[in-house]
Image: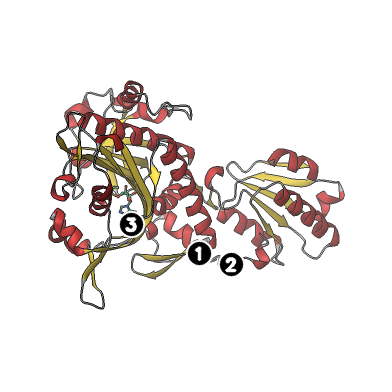
Amino acid sequence: MRLSRYFLPILREVPKEAEIVSHRLMLRAGMVRQESAGIYAWLPLGLRVLNKVCAIVREEQNRAGAIELLMPTIQSADLWRESGRYDDYGKEMLRIRDRHEREMLFGPTNEEMITEIVRGYVKSYKSLPLNLYHIQWKFRDEVRPRFGVYRSREFLMKDAYSFDLDAEGARHSYNKMFVAYLRTFSRMGLKAIPMVADTGPIGGNLSHEFIILASTGESEVFCHADYLDKAVPGAGTDFEDRAGLQGLVDQWTELYAATSEKHDSDAFGAIPEPRRLAARGIEVGHIFYFGTKYSAPFGAKVQGPDGAEHMIHMGSYGIGPSRLVAALIEASHDEAGIVWPEAVAPFRVGILNLKTGDSATDAACEDLYARLVAAGIDVLYDDTDERAGAKFASADLIGLPWQILVGPKSLAAGKVELKRRVDGTRELVSPDDVLERLT
Ligand SMILES: Nc1ncnc2c1ncn2[C@@H]1O[C@H](COS(=O)(=O)NC(=O)[C@@H](N)CS)[C@@H](O)[C@H]1O
């Protein structure tokens, strides 16, 4: 992409309404724009990151055997009356009437709808286990939306729902998602710790939140520090190996880790003091097992191998891709701006022409740009006539992992400067070597 033809409304000044660094940097880097309280437009640079986050989420859901569908954002109130949640969901629910005065709502979550869908088709245990997921916008009329897209009113959620014949099968489905979550956040360069959590309005009696440690996190968390050094399960994990998966989940739940709502200070106190971690964290995922809480009122049942009818056992599994963009910045930034992990960077490389209009640097930049694009690398070429200092500041602000600085002096010696954003290291290399390094 040529910056001269892109849409990247970078702000020079720090927006005063932004209280946390990710909110400040997302506004300054031209990633989002608030349209109303807690409701944002995702501008091109922000959308590229959001899409990369969703691609990783999708890959790991698919790896775990979940099947993607897409449910609507607008739901019928009658659906929520069947589960009894229509009234007790409270003011967070955005209730709407259509032209026929039918009561509708903007979905805050989809347990009811997915149960109604499965009830319509699944009649035999032979169709189970089943895990259906979608990545869809949700609306929760938060009383105090704040921190930008971290706690917004309209937000993107991956929500998966599992269906099993019995509790034992449901536990295996839960474990598949648990392991998929460990892999998902790790691939984004994040250390997420699974913590025993409250089930809240979703319900059930088994739940874990996946927390990223961050000083600006809303959650207060307590855990054994050994979690920070654990390696997550590999890409070759056998998701059908029930015992193996339970073993992995046991490894990731044997040490103490809990959010403040479930904190047990005695258990925490039993940890040797140097290994006790009390911190603030960002909830990026939350998984639940809630048995027949939704299948019973909806009569979602199957004929079992014994010929009898069995209510389906369910769980639901949420990740917040839009919140994750903020969490990634909270976890990875410096005083110059964002430092994107390569897996989610909006572009992998930035080419900075330090003397636009100079025939030598223009030609070298065009050549590098053409060859990187041809190699399938996401590259943003700053071909604007901004002065060099402004280009350096913008490139550091938007946080691309690699910068190629093309200036007349080094070019005269057949070199360009390759800068690694994460640690600021720079080296003079030939244009050919740059391609060697980046492809
Ligand atoms: N107001 C919000 N703004 C941004 N992300 C949010 C917001 N509320 C929740 N999320 C994200 O959505 C994830 C799942 O939300 S949840 O309420 O915990 N779970 C559910 O709704 C279940 N139906 C999971 S399928 C959270 O872990 C969080 O990452």
User: Looking at mark 1, is its residue's CB closer than 8 Å to ligand 1?
Assistant: no
Determine contact: label 2, label 1, CB under 8 Å: yes
Residue at point 67%, 48% (across, down): 376
Residue at point 70%, 56% (across, down): 352
Under mark 1, the amino acid is Leu
Relative to the observer, which residue lies in front, 392 or 116? Answer: 116
The image shows residue 86 at horizontal and vertical percentages of 16, 60
The correct choice, above or below, for 244 with respect to 260 in the image is: above
What residue does disc 1 label? 43
Mark found first going from the N terminus, 1 or 3 = 1
Under mark 2, the amino acid is Phe
Mark found first going from the N terminus, 3 or 2 = 2
Determine contact: label 3, label 2, CB under 8 Å: no
Relative to the observer, which residue lies in front, 312 or 411? Answer: 312
What residue does disc 3 label? 151
What residue does disc 2 label? 7
Crowding near the residue tagged with mark 2, few <14, some 14–19, many ≥20 C-alpha atoms within 10 Å: few
Q: Is residue 26 left or right of residue 80?
A: right
Q: What is the residue that sits farthest to the bottom in this orientation?
A: 99
The correct choice, above or below, for 355 with respect to 52 in the image is: below
